[in-house]
Amino acid sequence: MNARFELPAELTIYAAADTASALVAWLAGLEASTASVELAADQVLEVDGAGLQLLAALHKSCASRSQPLQITHATETLQKACATLGLQDLLKPTPTGASA
């Protein structure tokens, strides 16, 4: 079984605490049998270092739970921010011809 969480439009220091709280509650509700964790990032319009730090921490947390994290449908904004800080490996490639 896979689990999916929709990331908000704003992944910045102003929204990081609320997003982190929502993610922690969501992760706590997942069953141990959940094979992977998917974050849908097609709504992300703003991102900063705090938002990227949140994603990196979540990636580490999921790995420790043996539930791989996949960030899918990343917007161009999120792709560029991840590339700037060398975090592009967090993003699942968008299939050719699909919109991000």
Image: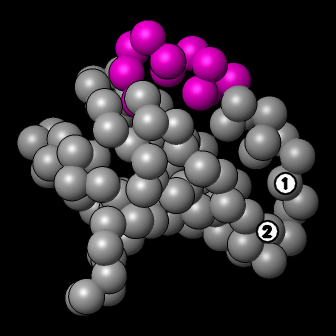
Q: Are marks 2 and 1 in contact (CB under 8 Å)?
A: yes
Q: Quadrant of the C terminus?
A: bottom left
Viewer-closest of 82 and 75: 75
**Up-down: is 13 above or below 47?**
above
Residue shown at 52%/37% (left/top)?
8
Viewer-closest of 93 and 99: 99
Residue 5 lies, in percent from the top left, at 65, 52
Residue 25 lies in quadrant: top right
Instruction: Work out whether residue 23 can be spotted.
Output: yes
Dot label at residue 30:
1
Q: Amino acid at mark 1?
A: Leu
Q: Is residue 1 left or right of residue 84?
A: right
Q: Is residue 86 left or right of residue 41?
A: left
Q: CA distance from mark 2 to mark 1?
A: 7 Å
**Which segment did they paint magenta?**
11-21
Q: Amino acid at mark 2?
A: Thr
Label 2: few (<14), some (14–19) or many (≥20) C-alpha neighbours in 10 Å: some
Residue 24 lies, in percent from the top left, at 72, 33
Residue shown at 44%/48% (left/top)?
43
Residue lying farthest left? Answer: 84
Residue 23 lies, in percent from the top left, at 67, 36
Disc 2: which residue: 34
Residue 66 lies, in percent from the top left, at 66, 64
Queried whether the magenta region covers residue 19, the answer comes back as: yes
Queried whether the magenta region covers residue 72, the answer comes back as: no
